[in-house]
Amino acid sequence: MSGAAREVLWRPTPARVAATKLERYRRWLEESRGLKLADYAQLHRWSVTELESFWESIVEHFGVEFATPPRRTLDSHRMPGARWFEGATLNYAEHIFRGRDEEATAIAHASELRELDTLSFGELRRQTARIAAGLRALGVGCGDRVAAYMPNIPETVAAFLACASLGAIWSSAAPEFGAGTVIDRFSQIEPKVLLAVDGYRYGGRDFDRRAVVDEIAAAIDSSPAVVRFGYLSGEGWPQAFLAGSGEASSAPPLSFTQVPFEHPLWVLYSSGTTGLPKAIVHSQGGMLLEQLKLSNLHLDAHAGDRVFWFTTTGWMMWNFLVGVLLADATIVLYDGNPGHPDLNTLWDLAQRAGITCFGTSAAFISACMKAGVTPREGRDLSALRALGSTGSPLSPEAFRWVYEKVGEDVWLFSTSGGTDMCTAFVGGVPTLPVRAGELQAPALGAAVAAFDEQGKPLLGEVGELVITEPMPSMPVFLWGDEDGARYRESYFSTYPGVWRHGDWIELHADGGAVIHGRSDATINRGGVRIGTAEIYRAVLALDQVLDALAVDLPGPDGEGRLELFVVPAPGVELDDELRSAIVRQLRTHCSPRHVPDEIVAIAEVPRTLSGKALEVPVKRILMGVEVQRAVSRDSLQNPAALEPFIRRAAARA
């Protein structure tokens, strides 16, 4: 990146730095361990070179309670296969409720069906206890799976915590997921119980899911008991499921099953755009430590803060958001369409709920930019001190927009990680400056590097994002992968013993980083590798373009053919003038190599249920691969968006 592109947009004041939990932790290390770590760079270096000491310090600093102490911290540094805190037992849910003020607000929540309301830690504990009793009555015990087809509401959080308290294994899917997608996921883990909503409201419309729930339950070989939650009807959980008379005073006490550190907490899923999605299993202990670190030190969540992230229950950001309760902060949930009735909805929620950290996606910020939304006009956003972005790279223009339209003193952090480890590898550091278009630094305990094809580290150049040392949040296994072959193939086949994540990253000497898109969607032009994020950053800077998808197709002479598909803004036509503007933008801000061979208008970019653009499956379709082999339609939020590419492939055949 050029020097101009590395402009500093914000710096924390000394007082703000001193008040962060990260600085408190650094000083604690100084006082308790005698470590002289002058800045974040030194702290990070220590965290990845002295792994055992670092994670032991997280345990001590945050008071992790082991029912049985570990025999050792780490058996070896091998990947895969490193074992953390062997012999230790604990319970994730117990740490959520431990020492909480029963009257303090745990959850603030709103939806298209419900007005803004709150739930205290005491109320959350009682809900959790009653659901745990209901699950126990259905025979759910340690190691059993509980699947949830539920929206982003407090009852879903309580159900997860109930599941974790029993040592059972949680897995969730959002109710907008089609039956096929849910069956592909839940049938792998054979749940004992399916918690399912009757329907949901999105964009002002009600969607009845009762027949879909019947279809899902019938297709799962384990024949799960189905517990239906009346969300549309307003009836809630059936009384037969809940323990007691329904009165809060009759709620049974919440108890916690102590499980081994590596015992499964939840199963998350890869996007599953081709074939069955990977069923990724994370441990109770690994996620507890990772989320304590992330929520406290990187998110800087404090008691009294209100942390929001727009997500559904089918995305790892939901699991991340629940983990913020470990920081004693309030989490803010929203269920519904963030663009209904317009893009002001979530900004209005920020004011009404007193949100202190507003988490969203790069796509949402870009949409607000294009729509001319000015969040701070006519609203009191004085509580808002941080804004987070994830899902895809955030452009420098979007960074500047936040400081111009949201607030000059907002800490803006972009993060990159993934479902595979349910965390961020690179992202927010509250004590560091914010540079346009950059992620601030690698996370503590994450040994992030950029590798070339030979496995040599790069600095200031684009390379494969790798993790060179084990982390507790690495999956303990993939469900159904008995010999670990799929696990090894997914993450360790490119660089043996090193985790390859599948993103292009550029690391700077001062720790700043830029994500350049997925490495499996790389464009090769004349031997030069180009990340698609560079193309999108340039093209989406044009007001006339809402969205874009770039695909590199092999040509008969060995030279790739770059095709760029763009979604014009409403009322805009992709004519010669706009095509010329796109070409000029790419030549000026990228290089002549970035100029596509063809620019085509489409109505929308096909995206996965978690919002990722479908670069590789679209490429396969355009290369003539049958649609059903290239992508699972049920894994998409907008399957009709595939049609232009299918027609284009047919015309070429």
Image (cartoon, grey):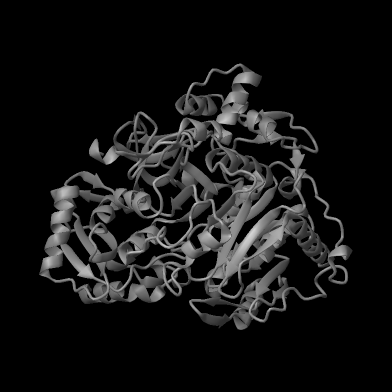
Q: Position of residue 470 (x, y in %)?
A: 55, 35
Residue 313 in view (yes/no): no
Q: Position of residue 184 (x, y in %)?
A: 55, 67
- Residue visible at 62% across and 75% down in the picture: 216
- Is 61 left or right of 412, judged from the image as shown? right
Would you place residue 194 above or below residue 431 in this image?
A: below
Residue 153 in view (yes/no): yes
- Residue visible at 65% across and 29% down in the picture: 56
- Residue visible at 37% across and 33% down in the picture: 455
**The N terminus - image quarter:** top left
Would you place residue 504 above or below residue 561 in this image?
A: above
**The C terminus - image quarter:** bottom left
User: On the image, which quarter does residue 549 sit in?
Assistant: bottom left
- Is 466 left or right of 118, judged from the image as shown? left
Would you place residue 485 above or below residue 351 in this image?
A: above
- Residue visible at 35% across and 73% down in the picture: 641
